Amino acid sequence: MRRAKISVIGAGNVGATCAHWAASKELGDIVLLDIPDKEGVAKGKALDLACCGPIERFDASIVGTSDYADIAGSDIVVVTAGLPRKPGMSRDDLIQTNVKIVRSVAEKVAEFARDSVMIVVSNPLDAMVYTAWKASGFPTNRILGQAGVLDVARFRTFIAMEIGCSVEDVSALLLGGHGDDMTPLPRYTSVHGVPVSQLLPQTTIDACVERAKMGGGEIVKLMGASAYYAPASATIQMAEAIIKDKKRIVPAAAYCDAEFGVGGYFVGVPCLLGAGGMEKVIEIELNAEEKALFDTSVAHVKDLVKVVGDLFPDLK
C-alpha cells in the first residue's frame, strides 16, 4: 500500500515542527525543503527527526533537501516559507517580500507536485493564500490557509483554563481573518454540550476572545519569537484530515464566493476537509453583531489582497 507523502517548504521552527508532528502521527513519508543556503539545516533536522523513529516507533522516510524535484508525488505540501515582520517594517514591505517568496514556492509546487493539496501557513496569511492560488493555478479546493484551527485552539485553551476543565471538552468556532481580524463566536462555544455562557460570566468570555486574538503576540512578547508548536500542530491536523479522508469540520482560510456573501476571497470559515481537500464550506447563521464583525474582517482581507494586486498586477 502506498504511503502518503507530505512535503514541508521551509525548515524553520514552524516547518520543522510540522515534520515532527507528521512523523509522530506516522502520516507518511516527509520531505523538508529549504533554499540552497539552508539545505544543511533541512538535511540536519530531517536526519535528527529520522533518528527518533526507533524510539518513538514510527516508520517514515524523512529527507531534507533544496531540490524541488524531491517533492514530486506529494499528497500535501505545507508552505511555511517567508520572513517574519521586523521592527520598522511596514505591512506593505512584509507583503512585498513574502509575496515574492510564496509566489516562487507556489510555482515550483505547481511544477513538481501539481496534484497535491497546498496548505499555506506563511504570513500575512490571507494575502499569502491568495498569492499561492494565483501563482499555482490550483483549483480552489486544493488551496487552504492554516489560521482558524490555531486560533480556535487558543480560544479553547483559554476557556478551559478559566473553567478548570479538559480542553478536549471545549468545542468552539470562529470566522474571518487571522489574528486581530478573527471573529470568535462564543454563541457557538460549548463545553461538552453546555453553552459556555452558562459556565462563565460574559466579561470572562470576552477576555478569552481578546486573548485568543492576541495569542500570537503574547507568545512573541514572552520568548521573543513567533509560536511554532501550536501552528504546526494545527497544520498537521488539517493534513491528517485530508490524507485520511476524515471529513473533519475545522475553521480554515478557504475560498468563498457566494458563501457568506464574500465574493471570491479566501477567508476563515468552517469547512469540511477530506480526500478532495476543501470539500465544502459550512455556512452558519450569524446574528447582526456577528455578521458585522465578520464583514469587517472580510474587508481587511480584501484590503490585503488589494495590496498584493497593486504591487504585483499580474496576480490580480
Image (cartoon, rainbow, N blue to C red):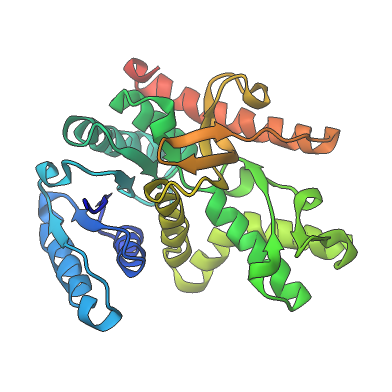
Query: In the rendered image of this protein, does residue 131 appear above or below residue 157?
Result: above
Query: In the rendered image of this protein, does residue 260 appear above or below residue 75?
Result: above
Tell me: 175 left or right of 255. Answer: right
Task: Return the residue found at the far front.
Answer: 1
Which residue appears at 57% of the width and 20% of the height?
A: 257
- Where does the image place residue 230, in percent across and percent down from the top left? 48, 63
Say which of 183 and 306 sits in front.
183
Image mark count: 0
Tell me: 266 left or right of 242. Answer: right
- Where does the image place residue 131, in percent across and percent down from the top left? 37, 30
Say which of 158 and 114 sits in front.
114
- Where does the image place residue 281, in percent across and percent down from the top left? 58, 33
Task: Return the residue found at the far bottom.
Answer: 55
For the C terminus, the quadrant is top left
Which residue appears at 35% of the width and 24% of the height?
A: 134
Tell me: 184 left or right of 11. Answer: right
Which residue appears at 20% of the width and 68% of the height?
A: 45
Which residue appears at 22% of the width and 72% of the height?
A: 49
- Where does the image place residue 176, in percent across and percent down from the top left? 62, 39
Residue 61: name its quadrant: bottom left
Query: In the rendered image of this protein, does residue 299 appear above or below residue 90?
Result: above
Residue 24 visible to an observer of this rendering: yes
Say which of 83 and 187 sits in front.
187
Say which of 232 and 103 sits in front.
232
